Image (cartoon, rainbow, N blue to C red):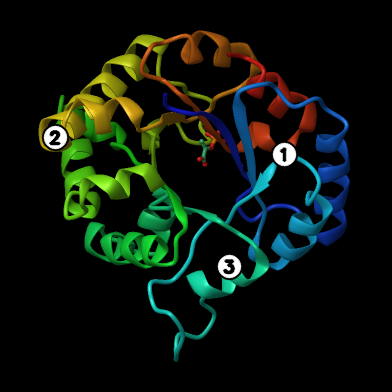
Amino acid sequence: MRKKIVAGNWKMNNDLAQTETLITELKAQSNPAEVEVMIAPSFTNLWQAFNSLKDDSIEVIAQNMHFAESGAYTGEISAAMLKSLGIKTVILGHSERRAYFNETDELLAKKVDAALANDMRVIFCFGEELADRKSGNEEVVVESQIKNALFHLGADAFKHIVLAYEPVWAIGTGETASPEQAQDMHAFIRKTVADTYGNDVANNVSILYGGSCKPSNAKEIFSKPDVDGGLIGGAALNAADFYAIANAF
Ligand code: PEP
């Protein structure tokens, strides 16, 4: 059975004090049964967040990492560093990393390999831009993003991969994919995985939706059979909203 997951991507928000405040508010909410709840604070606050949530079921995860184990990569963070804090999951391939930091499928393949080699779980993000959807190319784009970064892996690796479909036109824009658009794409993604790795692998991989997911639309989106949860940006910065989404299943 695949897992239901709701993960909050805090992006470059919240200093140390704000991180502590939001975590205190999150701890006051009751965790939904059978949903893995995760938050991704910034690197500087991971240690604090991890310790504050040591006895809670909320998992603290990272927003990014470098592919190298160590070395002359000023300003970067390795999987080994994350692991030394107790972090076990990393988001890779977010559209903001692709757009502002030139992360390509080839680079992401290396990052995925490094994370898996360090026994980390990967939340792998991908999604088409507005122009791709307008020209009817969304499936071609999504298929190539997944295949280029992940399809060199063996089937077993998919036990440690969570897929996150995030149409770029819906991220931080207030524009959400309709539940039907999300379902259609998630079904396509699952079929793409099944065609190469078989139904068992495809049926066990969690596929999250991301893009202006909020309390008012989460229930309908999460009710779709191939939507296994969400990667949440803006709404993850408010404890009540985030938990309303986590409880939307
Ligand atoms: C995201 O950044 O992954 C995201 C989904 O953002 P938002 O919810 O703000 O659209």
Q: Residue at x 82, y 43 (%)?
A: 22
Q: Residue at x 57, y 74 (%)?
A: 81
Report the mark closest to the observer, 2 or 3.
3
Q: Pick whichever, 244 or 160, lies toward us.
A: 160
User: Please, what is the three-letter code of the amino acid marked with disc 1?
Assistant: Ser
Q: Is residue 77 visible?
A: no
The mark found on residue 140 in the picture is: 2
Please state the horizontal and vertical placement of residue 231, each as a whole percent of the image.
52, 35
Q: Residue at x 66, y 67 (%)?
A: 85
Q: Pick whichever, 198 or 110, lies toward us.
A: 198
Q: Is mark 3 within 8 Å of ligand 1?
A: no
User: Please, what is the three-letter code of the amino acid marked with disc 3?
Assistant: Leu
Q: Which residue is mark 3?
A: 82
Q: Secondary structure at mark 3?
A: helix
Q: Which residue is mark 1?
A: 57
Please state the horizontal and vertical placement of residue 52, each as a whole percent of the image.
83, 53
Q: Residue at x 51, y 77 (%)?
A: 76
Query: How far separated are the C-alphas under marks 3 and 1?
Result: 19 Å
